[in-house]
Structures are given as C-alpha cells and as structure tokens.
Amino acid sequence: MSIYLDHAATTPLRPEALEAMLPHLVGAFGNPSSAHALGRAARNALDEAREQLAADLGGSAREVVLTSGGTEANNLAVKGAAWAGKARGNRIVVSAVEHHAVGHTAEHLAKWGFEIASAPVDGAGRVDPAAVEDLLDERTVLVAVMLANNEVGTIQPVRAIADRVRSRRGIHLHVDAVQAAPYLDLDVADLGADTVAISAHKFEGPKGVGALWVRRGTPLLAQVHGGSQERHRRAGTENVAGAVGMAAAYALACAAKPETRARMLDLRTRLQAACLALEGVELTGHPTDRLPGLLSLLVRGADGVAASVALDLEGIACSTGSACATGSPEPSHVLTSMGISSAEAMGALRLSLGRGTTTEEIEAAVALVPRVLAGIRDGSAALAADPLGSRIA
Ligand code: PLP
C-alpha cells in the first residue's frame, strides 16, 4: 500500500499536462526567439500558454513573467520591488510565516542596506492587517504576505491588508500564492496585490516552472540579466514545454476548484477527526480559514521526524513541516511565530491531500495514522520516563 499525503510538497504531473507538453519536448523544439518556422511555432505555443494562464489568473498576458518556479518568482518580486524602490526608502515588511523563498530573500536584502520588519501572527498563524499597517512608514517600499501558508494552511486576509497598504502610495504588495493557487479562487486583479507568485508543480503541472504576475506599470528590476525575454524582466530562453504544461494544468485546476475544494475538505475533516481523537494530538493553524486539504498536527512530546518515518514504513508519505525544511534540525519558524515552543514544534507533522486523493486512501489513513501516532507518542513518553532509555536515545 502506498498513500501519498504530501501534496503541499509537490503533486504528480497530470496526464493532460504531459500530453500538452510532449510535442514541445520532442518535435517542436524551436527557440521562441528564432525567426524561422520552428521558432515561430514555439513562440505561438508560448504566447498561447501565457494568454491562457493570464486569463485564468484574471490578468493580461503582458503582466505574466514566466520563471523557473515559485522560488524564482518570489525572488524577482521581493528583490525587484525592493531595488526599484530603493531611492524612496529601504524598509520592507514581511510576515513572520513566509516561505523561505520570501523570508530568506528579505534577509539577504538586509545585508544590502534594507531594514526588515516582521509582521507578527496570532496563534492560528494569521497576520493582523492593523499590525501590518502599524509597521508602515514613509521609508516602506515593500510588504510581502502569502495567501496561504505551506506548513499550517492558514489563509491570510490579503484583501484587507491590500486595502491598508494601497492607501499608502508607492508601497508594493507582494503575495506568494504558491500554495493557494491550486485550491482557492484567485483573481489577481481583485486581490489588490502588485505581484503574485505561483508554481506549476503544486497544481499537477511540471516542476521547474512558475510565474510572477506583475500589475501593469509596477516598477520591478530584473534579477536575471541577458536577453530581452519576458519584456526584459527575466532573461533566458523560455521553457516552452513547461509553460504549456503549466497553463494546461492550471486551466484544469481552475475548472474544478469548487468540487476539488469540497471533496478535499470532506476527506481532510475525516482524517483530522480521527487524529484529533488521540490524546496529545492538536491541530495547528486556523481551524476553518485554511487550505481544504492541509492537515497540520502537533503530536505533543513526540518527534515529528520519527512519526513521518514510521508512517513512511507503513506506506504513507507525509512531511514534518515544509519539504524545504526537511533534514534541518531547526524548529519551524512558522510554528514558533505562532507561539509554539521550539521543543513542542519538533512534534509537527503535515499530511496534505491532493485532487487525486481517494476516499479509500483516506479510509486506510484513518485506520493507520492514529495507530502509528499513538505508538510514537507512547514510545517517546516511555523513553522520556526511563532514564536509561533517554540516555540511549
Ligand atoms: N512559496 C511557497 C508557499 C511554497 O510552498 C513553495 C514550495 O514549497 C515555494 C514558494 C517555492 O516554490 P518552488 O518549489 O516552485 O520553487
């Protein structure tokens, strides 16, 4: 038995996206910058993919910058907006629970004269729009708040934050929508942001391709230099097959979002109830304003890594936090920002469902996950109570 419950880390490539990509990997291999027929065919495919993606995002094609994924899209937005605004100010406000693609990028900018202010979150991982507003001053050039968190699934009140940020002219609002885009209704023009990042492999598209939507007229300095691709905003020969696969996957995801959401919410609720019935197991993140398929747990006194290894041995793939943090002994910055102690945060576990998750898989997980968690919890408790055991550990 093998049950994949790590869709927040990545999703399988859907067959329709693969089918759309294949001609551009094999026969139609031209460079979109070439003037000959093969090049023109590649340019047409790229233009169509961009048009489709832009329409599904609620923007226009010229506002879409294709990138190598969510990390690059976030880097372009954060560095590009910060440097574009440097003459006016050097202050950047970043939520405390951003993905490292945003948080570490801001930390990098701190080495270059930018001042970083961290917008706090409450116990559910939610940013208070008034707290963001309090952090704004005349020198602020950029605010970055994600739409939904990758570790605990909490959805941020981005529209309310946008209202407060946009009332101050000249402050750029960046929104990382990488986790939200597959499941939440997303209309970039409506969101009130200046830039929005997405990544194809989170919605059953290919890995290594993403996009940054950039509101028309937004000042942004390119971070990759070379050719004039992407209207001078991102140099490099375009990933035509990747863009085609991303557009195909996102169109299909959009067409089914309401049904996907409802089904995933139902399945996640069942798994959640079974896990929370165990003593010492708690839900992290917001109880209701959260991604439909993301179940984030804290197993009190247990080691999340041990729990995920034990589940893996039973055929269930899940994660201890964000995939990027795997292997790192550090507690999650998301959980500690929410007021959870570093020691407790080591008991974090994330089970994330996807569009393809079946009822049978969740029924099997309902039978298995609580049993494995109880074993880990009781084993850890026994180890902690036994001085010899704790020395061995
Ligand atoms: N932002 C968030 C919220 C994510 O969850 C991830 C990936 O886990 C990224 C950014 C990075 O995206 P990519 O893997 O496409 O670089």
Image: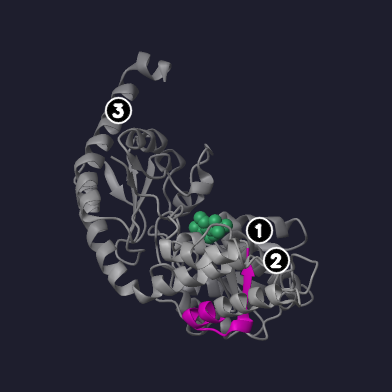
Residue 176 shows up from this direction: no
**303 up-or-down from 274: above or below:** above
Residue 133 shows up from this direction: yes
Circle 3 residues within 10 Å: few <14, some 14–19, many ≥20:
some
**37 up-or-down from 356: above or below:** below
Q: Secondary structure at mark 1?
A: helix
> Which label number is shown at residue 381?
3
Q: Is residue 249 left or right of residue 136?
A: left
> Which label number is shown at residue 92?
none
The amino acid type found where label 3 is placed reads Ala
Per the image, the residue denoted by label 1 is: 105
Disc 3 to disc 1, how far (Cα)? 39 Å
Mark 3 vs mark 1, foreground winner is 1
Contact between marks 1 and 2 (CB within 8 A): the answer is: yes
Q: Look at the image and say whether residue 55 sits in the magenta stretch.
A: yes
- The mark nearer the N terminus, 3 or 1, is 1
Q: Where's residue 302, x and y in %?
A: 35, 34
Where, by quadrant of the figure, is residue 309 drawn?
top left
> Which label number is shown at residue 79?
2
Contact between marks 3 and 2 (CB within 8 A): the answer is: no
Q: Look at the image and say whether residue 157 sits in the magenta stretch.
A: no
- The mark nearer the N terminus, 3 or 2, is 2
Residue at x 48% of width, y 62% of height: 18
Tell me which segment is drawn in magenta: 51-67
Q: Secondary structure at mark 3?
A: helix
